[in-house]
Each structure stands twice: as structure tokens, then as C-alpha cells.
Image (cartoon, rainbow, N blue to C red):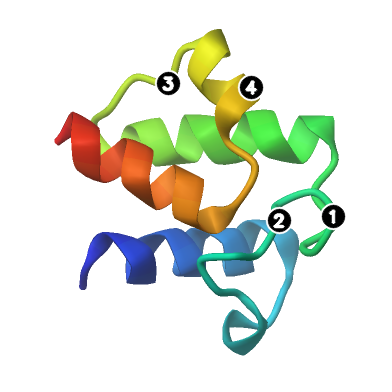
Amino acid sequence: MDTMEKVVTLLSEQLGVDKDTINAGSDVVKDLGADSIDVVQLLMAMEDEFGVTVTEDDAGNLKTVGDIVSLIDNRK
């Protein structure tokens, strides 16, 4: 499973959103309905899943699913 698939699966499970509605351009807050608590939980889950560290500065720049995938791929 590649990074995009893993991220989509995590988002789907955490937010209760159908995987088929999530794509690289999906805005995590606007399109997927995440609130601030959801975002923190998602970032912690992604750090655990991928073994990367997401700083507060990084988190502020993560708007779309594609942003998340790029960050993870660049940190691996």
C-alpha cells in the first residue's frame, strides 16, 4: 500500500468519510469535515503510522490530502 492509500484509509477511518470521496485535492477541513481536534488526532496517527514528526509549522501548512502525502514522502 502506498502513502496515498494509507493516508486515505486513515482519514476515512478517523473521519467516517467514504474512501471514494477522498482525493489528493480534498481539503481536510472544508471537504472532509475535520475540526481542530480531528486534525490533532490525525497528525498523531500519521506520526505513529509513518514514523515521521510533524511540527506545528508543518501542521499549519497541511491543508489538503496531497499536502499530507507530500510531507510524509519527503520525511521518509
Question: Where in the figure is residue 27, as x and y percent of width and height?
Answer: 71, 56
Residue 13 is left or right of residue 55, and the answer is right
Residue 74: horizontal and vertical position, in percent?
A: 21, 36
Q: Position of residue 33 (x, y in %)?
A: 85, 57
Q: How far apart are marks 3 and 4 (CA)?
A: 10 Å
Q: Which residue position holds label 4?
A: 60
The 10 Å Cα crowd at callout 4, few under 14, some 14 to 19, many 20 or more, is: few
The residue to which callout 1 is attached is 30
Q: Callout 2, which amino acid?
A: Asp
Residue 56, quarter of picture: top right
Which residue type carries mark 3? Val
Q: Earlier in the sequence, mark 4 or mark 2?
A: 2
Given this view, does label 3 or label 1 mark the residue nearer the observer? Answer: 1
Label ID, residue 54: 3
Q: Residue at x 85, y 40 (%)?
A: 35
Identify the residue at horizontal 35%, vertical 37% (top origin): 71
Q: What residue type is labelled 1?
A: Lys
The answer to which of marks 3 and 4 sits earlier in the sequence is 3
Which residue matches tag 2? 27
Mark 2 crowdedness (10 Å alpha carbons): few <14, some 14-19, many ≥20: some
Helix, strand or loop at label 4? It is: helix
CB atoms at circles 1 and 2 under 8 Å apart?
yes
